[in-house]
Amino acid sequence: MNIPLIDVVGQNLALAAELEDAFARVLRSGRYILGPEVEALESEIAHLAGAKYGIGVSSGTDALLLALMALDIGPGDEVICPAFTFFASAGSIARTGATPVFADICPHCFNIDPADAEGRVTEKTKAIMPVHLYGQSADMDPIVDLAQKHGLAIVEDAAQAIGAKYKGAPVGGIGDFGAFSFYPTKNLGALGDAGMLVTSDDSLAARARKLRVHGGERRYYHEEVGGNFRIDEVQAALLRIKLRRLGDYEAAREANARFYRDAFAALGDEQPHPSSCCGLSDSSPTSAPLALPSPAEGRCHTWNQFTLRVGGGRRDHLKDFLAAKGIGAEVYYPLCLDQQKCFAGNARGGDSVRAAHSAAAECLSLPIYPELTTSCRDRVADAILGFFAA
Ligand SMILES: *Cc1c(COP(=O)(O)O)cnc(C)c1O
């Protein structure tokens, strides 16, 4: 039997009866977009993120774009984001007409390096977008400090990190805006595209709500040009049902992470991870065959991905070896943003984001979804131990 990297079906099928009741309710309600289910989900996610308002949107990407639009970011502006993240972080910046400026990452937690980011601030910089990659918070204290010092807005890309915390504060609610994605493979996954923007600022919330529906408070009267960034009732109804189980899903991911960390302890170079790991600047943290992911002090990891670093140029061999055994493993992400063709004209990366390039060459994510059985988990661990024993 193959072990996929991700299994989104099992979790939804386990709730089939409850979900079908909810779908039937929406079907009969005649409210298909932005109705009572969306409003309830908005307040539930805002509460979870420690923010005042939730604004349900069509995807995580649209949440980011809407946040930047509401902050009036556009041509001539610069926004700093990490060089190593999913494309949408930088894509949303570029779509406003602003220039994404790529900062290097911390080789230990894979998140934006605040000191490197600060070195890239210019008079054009309007915002910084920390990404809580793989489910672990970025090092927010120095990011909040540098944003205050330089008058920058903070847009948190929390797409992979719903429920994660930084020194007790939920991610998403720390910056001016936080963006969540409910793409099916995220820790809280919909049955299609959906997302949520959160903020505690009254006027930013009102602006984002207006831009979500073509920039008009009253239908057919438009004060400005927005877009269609709306979310469906059927997605909201499903997400509310799954949100009640989010704690169970997180606990199962955490147990899988603990299992892998124990299983690979002898192979791994277990780094000390103080909360300020981003200040330890060696770009390749391991001389051992593996570097194991571990939560930095004060940051609870929600394990959207369990991502190893495989040293010695053997990452792709390991991936192929696992594939031959029917085990899914994936590289998130094989190219950094400064290496993407579409950003070829943007030279703000290159050799200056070395830790990001090295992460892209060494990272490999293993199956960690909550429904992964203990026997599948054992097989993954045995295969990896066998690879390094050979
Ligand atoms: C998934 C993801 C997004 C985009 O979310 P969508 O809902 O797929 O649009 C943005 N940033 C990061 C880091 C992501 O992982």
Image (tube, rainbow, N blue to C red):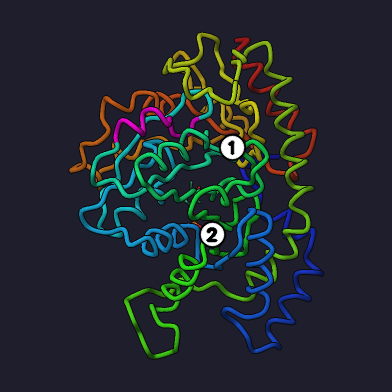
Q: Nearer the viewer, residue 381 or 156?
A: 156
Point 70% across, 31% down: residue: 257
Q: Secondary structure at mark 2?
A: strand
**CA neighbours of label 1 inside 10 A, class few (<14), some (14 to 19), many (20+):** many
Name the element at disc 1: loop
- Residue sitting at x 73%, y 32%: 377
Q: Which mark is residue 136?
A: 1
Side of 141 relative to 75 (left or right): right
> Whole-percent x and y of residue 283?
41, 18
Where, quadrant-wise, is the C terminus in this rendering?
top right
Using a 10 Å C-alpha cutoff, classify the residue at mark 2 as few (fewer than 14 neighbours), some (14 to 19) or many (20 or more): many
Residue at label 2? 199
Q: Which one is nearer the viewer's eye here, 201 or 42?
A: 201
Q: Is mark 2 within 8 Å of ligand 1?
A: no
Report the side of 290 relative to 74 (left or right).
right
Magenta segment? 110-120
Instruction: Kindly identify the residue that appears in the image at 62 percent across and 45 percent down.
Output: 6
Q: From what the image shows, is residue 11 above or below residue 40?
A: above
Disc with the residue nearer the chain's start (1 vs 2): 1
Q: Are marks 1 and 2 in contact (CB under 8 Å)?
A: no
Q: Which label number is shown at residue 108?
A: none
Specify the amino acid type for callout 2.
Thr
Q: Is residue 102 magenta?
A: no
Residue in the picture at 68% in, 59% down = 47
Horizontal arrangement in the rendering, residue 69 relative to residue 385 (left or right): left
